[in-house]
């Protein structure tokens, strides 16, 4: 079987160091925050080229606290994309603000900067570009619009640890960067985890307080805070894994290049790495014209695939109150109907990559030529 991701093989490759790191935390009894979390924060700030890094319990909490620190609240609007994991939008609504959607660029699956300006109103406070699949959004025009309209930029970098935009690491470009260490992410904890990066001392101070009950010193609650602390064991695990992240990222990029080579000249639409980007391939998604059949047939050959994501957020029942309709974000809707994520993890072997690619090419050769890549209405 070729799994979609394989966390066990990775654990076994670093087992000695991980087990010792966890045992160290058990001995120290620093179970939440503590010195391992502090060291991880310093190391991750350096890794992203950021001045400050604040560990929190999930990527969703990272987004929530960045929004609160940006003073986003009831009556405000925050611009983001509907083609993302639901957490991006959920975090906006936790603050009492409302998400306003802008469609994606269908080549990159990230926000189309040319459409942002038209979505800005007097209530807009922030923009959340999502570095989906591990490729940075086109940040320069986003930062220009933000500066012109006085908006805060919060990078959703939950899928993009180590990705770069014009040589700059994500998380160091906007006012905030938000990361997730959910186990399946490029840098994954052994449990939940998240982190906020920022360059501003005042933002650092506020996020740091909010994650721990709004207190700067014990029982001195200055703000209405949360229990969003990162656990000591996760800090220790993440420190071990951060040392491997560059190697794992290069392995992901090599697998992507191998897939690309197989699919070159075929009808398969592959991920497009932009000239400005260091793409870190959290997800390698192709477009499949007969997706459910392809997925079933690959499964029958013991090849696991995924769909990220089958429904854009504006069409999810949970966000029906935003009153968007089908057809409003055609690129997001089309992508949601077509994307198919192939197995992608650093330990995937060249042989496994070849097996997957051959199976996909075989399926594509059986699909009627000309049927692929056309809008639904044209079929
Ligand atoms: C994973 C993810 C999140 C949320 O992170 P959690 O740690 O699961 O809370 C937010 N945005 C995107 C794009 C993600 O992929």
Image: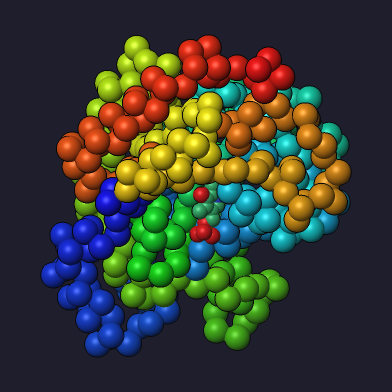
Q: Residue at x 33, y 75 (%)?
A: 233
Res. 265 image quadrant: top left
Taking 281 as reference, is 199 left or right? Answer: right
Taking 279 as reference, is 262 left or right? Answer: left
Residue at the left extreme of this rendering: 16
- Looking at the rendered image, the quarter that the C terminus falls into is top right
Res. 333 image quadrant: top right
Q: Residue at x 68, y 50 (%)?
A: 89
Name the spot of residue 152 as percent of width and height, x first. 65, 41
Q: Is residue 40 visible?
A: no
Name the spot of residue 13 as percent of width and height, x first. 16, 59
Q: In front here: 29 or 297?
A: 297
Name the spot of residue 62 as percent of width and height, x first. 55, 58
Q: Residue at x 57, y 43 (%)?
A: 309
Q: In front here: 311 or 105?
A: 311
User: Can you say whether 14 is above or below 365 in the image?
Assistant: below
Render colour scheme: rainbow
Taking 47 as reference, is 224 left or right? Answer: right
Name the spot of residue 30 as percent of width and height, x first. 35, 83
Taking 37 as reference, is 133 left or right? Answer: right
Q: How many marks?
A: 0
Res. 216 image quadrant: bottom right
User: Can you say whether 357 is above or below 55 in the image?
Assistant: above
Q: Residue at x 27, y 21 (%)?
A: 261
Q: Is residue 141 visible?
A: yes
């Amino acid at each position: 079987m070729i799994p979609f991701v394989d966390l066990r093989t990775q654990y076994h490759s670093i087992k000695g160091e991980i087990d010792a790191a966890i045992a160290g935390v058990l001995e120290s009894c620093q179970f939440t925050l503590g010195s391992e979390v502090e060291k991880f924060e310093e190391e991750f700030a350096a890794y992203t080229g950021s001045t400050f890094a604040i560990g929190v319990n999930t990527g969703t909490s990272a987004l929530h606290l960045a929004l609160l620190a940006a003073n986003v609240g009831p009556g405000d609007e925050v611009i983001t994309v509907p083609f993302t994991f639901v957490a991006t939008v959920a975090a906006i609504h936790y603050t009492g603000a409302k998400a306003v959607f802008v469609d994606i660029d269908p080549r990159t699956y990230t926000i189309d900067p040319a459409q942002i300006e038209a979505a800005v109103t007097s209530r807009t406070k922030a923009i959340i570009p999502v570095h989906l699949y591990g490729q940075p959004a086109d940040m320069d025009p986003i930062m220009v619009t933000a500066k012109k309209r006085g908006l805060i930029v919060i990078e959703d970098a939950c899928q993009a640890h180590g990705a770069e935009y014009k040589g700059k690491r994500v998380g160091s470009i906007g006012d905030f960067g938000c990361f997730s260490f959910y186990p399946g992410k490029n840098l994954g904890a052994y449990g939940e985890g998240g982190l906020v990066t920022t360059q501003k001392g005042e933002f650092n101070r506020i996020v740091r307080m909010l994650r721990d009950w709004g207190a700067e010193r014990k029982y001195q609650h200055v703000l209405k805070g949360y229990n969003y602390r990162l656990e000591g064991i996760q800090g220790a695990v993440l420190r071990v894994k951060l040392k491997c992240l560059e190697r794992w990222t290069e392995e992901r990029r090599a697998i992507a290049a191998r897939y690309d080579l197989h699919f070159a000249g075929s009808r398969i639409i592959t991920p497009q790495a932009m000239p400005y980007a260091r793409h870190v391939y959290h997800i390698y998604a192709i477009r499949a014209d007969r997706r459910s059949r392809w997925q079933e047939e690959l499964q029958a050959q013991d090849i696991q695939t995924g769909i990220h994501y089958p429904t854009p957020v504006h069409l999810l029942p949970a966000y029906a109150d935003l009153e968007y309709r089908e057809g409003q974000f055609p690129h997001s809707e089309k992508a949601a109907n077509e994307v198919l994520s192939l197995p992608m993890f650093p330990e995937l072997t060249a042989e496994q990559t070849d097996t997957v690619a051959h199976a996909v090419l075989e399926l594509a050769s059986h699909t009627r030529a000309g049927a692929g890549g056309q809008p639904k209405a044209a079929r």
